């Protein structure tokens, strides 16, 4: 039941963010370096991601200085005679760091569309200064029948400077980090706290999924200064990817419990395979933090 709740929370977060975000290549050529590719110019050739009897997706260009953020231009075609298709980006990463371009658009039967996929998140705040390996998973499905099989589900890498120039994001550790777990499967690091976060008191996290399946990170039985205070948080991270995430408590939760200074946060961490809920948890431990 807790796994279902975490899934619904993650889905709700994705929906709320949207209201306000060649085939898969081998990564063996990537180097672990955040250094920008200063002397290289983008040399891009059109990429056909999908071209079947039902739809076509092509990456047609790159606009690194678009006003809405780093942008990929995409050509979409619905070859159906009577169905409206939803074209979406199911997940995305830049240099191995998960991000969400919040892209989803419908194309009517028999129509075509030129669209922009905008990466508006400020990844430079995390130390990522250049886009060398953009990975996208496109999903296309019947917009009026969500139970129907996908029309297309395809992952593609876009290498703006060429695959040989691809780099992998590496976060530099800080003396203030609190490492909750760092094993062969996952890493969870508390990178800091913000008393005046936009959504209330906020705990900043860095998450790494080292497995070959998508995993869900969630917390249960959360307390602040001994008072139960559920932040209603869960975050999924794609296979082999890293992500930054925030756990926030509303001001009203603190006011109701007369909390003015956070002295202790208790929580049970649950990390599990989001593609197979029958498996045992990858990580499950109760942790006490003293900010």
Image (cartoon, rainbow, N blue to C red):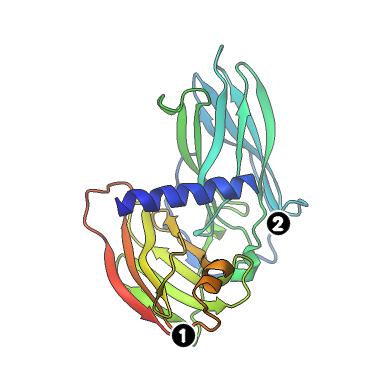
Q: Residue at x 70, y 32 (%)?
A: 114
Task: Let me know if residue 224 appears in the view.
Answer: yes
**Residues under labels 2 and 1: Cα distance?**
50 Å
Q: Residue at x 64, y 58 (%)?
A: 121
Position of residue 5 measured from the top left corner of the image (x, y, whole percent): 37, 51
Q: Is residue 60 left or right of residue 145?
A: right
Q: Please tell me whether mark 2 sits on a helix, a strand or a loop.
A: loop
Please give the residue where the numbered disc 1 appears in the rendered image: 263
Position of residue 97 measured from the top left corner of the image (x, y, whole percent): 51, 60
Taking depth in this image into account, of 258 and 273 the one nearest to the observer is: 258
Q: Please tell me whether mark 1 sits on a helix, a strand or a loop.
A: loop
Q: Residue at x 68, y 48 (%)?
A: 71
Q: Are marks 2 and 1 in contact (CB under 8 Å)?
A: no
- Extreme residue in the right direction: 67
Q: Nearer the viewer, mark 2 or mark 1?
A: 1
The picture quadrant where one finds residue 57 is: top right
Please give the residue where the numbered disc 2 appears in the rendered image: 41
Q: Using a 10 Å C-alpha cutoff, classify the residue at mark 2 as few (fewer than 14 neighbours), some (14 to 19) or many (20 or more).
A: few
Q: Is residue 77 above or below residue 232?
A: above
């Amino acid at each position: 039941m807790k796994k279902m709740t975490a899934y619904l929370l993650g889905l709700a977060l994705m929906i709320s963010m949207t209201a306000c975000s060649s085939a898969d290549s081998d990564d063996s050529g990537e180097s672990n370096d955040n250094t920008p590719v200063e002397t290289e110019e983008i040399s891009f050739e059109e990429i056909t991601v999908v071209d079947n009897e039902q739809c076509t997706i092509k990456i047609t260009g790159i606009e690194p200085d678009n006003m809405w953020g780093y942008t990929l231009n995409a050509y979409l075609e619905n070859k159906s005679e009577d169905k409206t298709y939803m074209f979406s980006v199911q997940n995305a990463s830049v240099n191995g760091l998960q991000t969400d371009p919040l892209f989803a658009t419908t194309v009517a039967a028999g129509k075509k569309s030129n669209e922009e996929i905008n990466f508006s998140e400020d990844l430079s705040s995390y130390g990522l200064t250049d886009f060398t390996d953009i990975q996208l998973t496109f999903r296309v499905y019947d917009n009026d029948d969500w139970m129907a099989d996908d029309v297309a589900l395809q992952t593609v890498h876009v290498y703006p400077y060429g695959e040989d120039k691809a780099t992998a994001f590496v976060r530099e550790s800080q003396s203030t980090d609190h490492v909750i777990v760092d094993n062969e499967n996952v890493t969870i690091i508390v990178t800091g706290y913000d008393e005046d976060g936009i959504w209330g008191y906020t705990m900043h996290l860095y998450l790494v999924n080292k497995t070959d399946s998508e995993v869900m990170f969630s917390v249960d039985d959360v307390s602040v200064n001994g008072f139960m205070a559920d932040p209603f948080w869960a975050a999924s991270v794609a296979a082999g990817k890293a992500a930054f995430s925030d756990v926030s408590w509303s001001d009203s939760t603190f006011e109701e419990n007369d909390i003015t200074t956070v002295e202790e946060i208790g929580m049970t961490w649950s990390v599990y395979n989001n593609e197979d809920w029958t498996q045992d948890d990858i990580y499950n431990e109760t942790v006490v933090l003293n900010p």
